[in-house]
């Protein structure tokens, strides 16, 4: 593939950038639990770790393995995120709104209290 291959598929690049922007918003979102966020942290550690599956000494292959790990981590993170925050931030991105945390929803536990005498 030549240097213009990304230009031949602008929708692919746009989708990747949109997913990256969504992931950045979700990493900052308090409603997203810690375990999915660890996936992004793990990918970042892999990128800065000096030992790779394919060393960067091999032209192109070393960089492709890094890109593959980042893309897989991005997809896994988005898959593991709860649907409510993901939907909220997708809509915010579509509307062009700046980042703000998802409004807290009142969490109510409906229960009966019974006192045995």
Image (cartoon, rainbow, N blue to C red):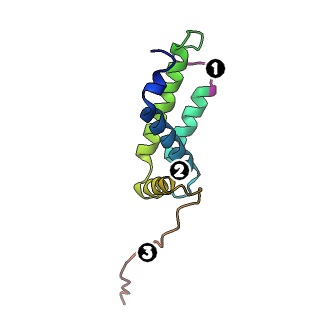
For disc 3, the neighbor class at 10 Å (few under 14, some 14 to 19, many from 20) is: few
Q: Residue at x 48, y 33 (%)?
A: 13
Q: Which residue is mark 3?
A: 108
Give the position of the N terminus as an image quadrant.
top left
Observer-side mark, 2 or 3, equals: 2
Left or right position of 48 against 114: right
Which secondary structure, mark 2? helix
Q: Which residue is mark 1?
A: 50
For disc 2, the neighbor class at 10 Å (few under 14, some 14 to 19, many from 20) is: many
Callouts 2 and 3 close, C-beta under 8 Å: no
Task: Give the mark nearest the N terminus, 3 or 1.
Answer: 1
Give the position of the C terminus as an image quadrant.
bottom left
Q: Residue at x 43, y 25 (%)?
A: 8
**Residue 52 part of the magenta-drawn span:** yes
The magenta span reads: 48-53
Is 41 situated above or below 89?
A: above
Observer-side mark, 1 or 2, equals: 2
Residue 26 bears which disc, if any? 2
Task: Give the mark nearest the N terminus, 1 or 2.
Answer: 2
Prevailing secondary structure of the magenta residues = loop
């Amino acid at each position: 593939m030549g240097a213009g291959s990304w230009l031949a598929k602008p929708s692919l690049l746009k989708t990747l950038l949109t997913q990256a922007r969504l992931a950045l918003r979700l990493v900052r979102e308090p409603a997203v639990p810690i375990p999915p966020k660890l996936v992004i942290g793990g990918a970042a550690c892999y990128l800065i770790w000096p030992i790779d599956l394919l060393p960067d000494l091999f032209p192109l292959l070393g960089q492709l393995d890094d890109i593959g790990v980042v893309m897989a981590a991005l997809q896994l993170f988005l898959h593991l995120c709860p649907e409510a925050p993901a939907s909220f931030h997708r809509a915010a991105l579509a509307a062009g709104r700046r980042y703000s945390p998802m409004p807290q929803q009142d969490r109510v536990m409906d229960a009966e209290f019974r006192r045995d005498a």
